[in-house]
Image (cartoon, helix red, strand yellow):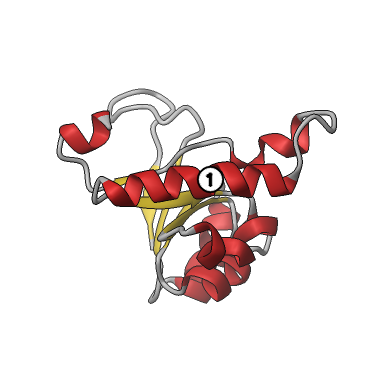
Amino acid sequence: DGCAAKGYRAIEPDNYDSYTRSKNLLTAGQAKAYLTLLATHAHSKNLAIGQKNTVELAGARTAVGLDFAVAEECGQYDECGDYVDAFGNNVIVIEYTDSGRRTACSQYGGTLSIVQRDVDVSVPGDPGYVRKTC
C-alpha cells in the first residue's frame, strides 16, 4: 500500500525462497500461496509484482500472478534460461562477478537487462563500487 501511495510502479517482495531455509516449517506450496495473495493485492493497487530468485518456482509464475523476475547470478549458475522460459524478456539480471556477467551478456545481452554490481551495492566513489553492463 505504501509503495502504491508513493507512486511506485512495481514491487519485489524478497524471501520467496524462505521455505528452503525454514527447516520444514514452510513448504513451496505455502510460499506460492502467500505470494499469490501478495500478487493479487499488488495488482489491486495497479502495481506489477516480481519474483526474486527462487528459480525452482519460476514455472509457477502464471498461477501465482507474477509479472517479472529479478534474477541474481543466473549467469553464474546457468539459470537465466529458466527465468526466460517463465518470464520471457521480463527478467532483470544482477551479477556479482565478471564471469557471471560475461556469461549472461553472451547469452542474453540483447534481450535482458543485465548489470554487474558489488555485493554491498555501494555508491560511486566508494572503494568497492562496481557497476558494469553488457
Q: Is residue 115 above or below residue 26?
A: below
Is there any visible trace of residue 83 in the rendered image? yes
- According to the picture, the residue beneath numbered tag 1 turns out to be 35
Looking at the picture, how far across and down is residue 117, in whole percent? 44, 41
Residue 71, above or below 120: below
Seen from the viewer's position, the closer of residues 130 and 70 is 70
How many marks the image carries: the answer is 1
Which residue appears at 58% of the width and 56% of the height? 100
In the displayed structure, 7 sits above or below 103; it is above
Residue that extends furthest to the right in the rendered view of this protein:
24
Q: Position of residue 11 (x, y in %)?
A: 35, 43
x and y percent of residue 101 in the render? 51, 57
The quadrant where residue 45 appears: top left
Q: Which quadrant of the figure contains the N terminus?
A: top left
- Whether residue 116 can be seen here: no
**Is 64 placed left or right of 67 in the picture?**
right
Say what secondary structure mark 1 lies in. Answer: helix
Identity of the amino acid at label 1? Answer: Leu
33 and 99: which is toward the camera: 33
Q: Nearer the viewer, residue 107 or 7?
A: 7
- For disc 1, the neighbor class at 10 Å (few under 14, some 14 to 19, many from 20) is many
Give coordinates of residue 21: x percent, y percent.
76, 31
Identify the image quadrant of the C terminus. bottom left
Residue located at (52% from left, 50% from top): 36
Residue name at image x 72 percent, y 37 percent: 19
Which residue is located at x 60 percent, y 47 percent?
33
Q: Which image quadrant for residue 67?
A: bottom left
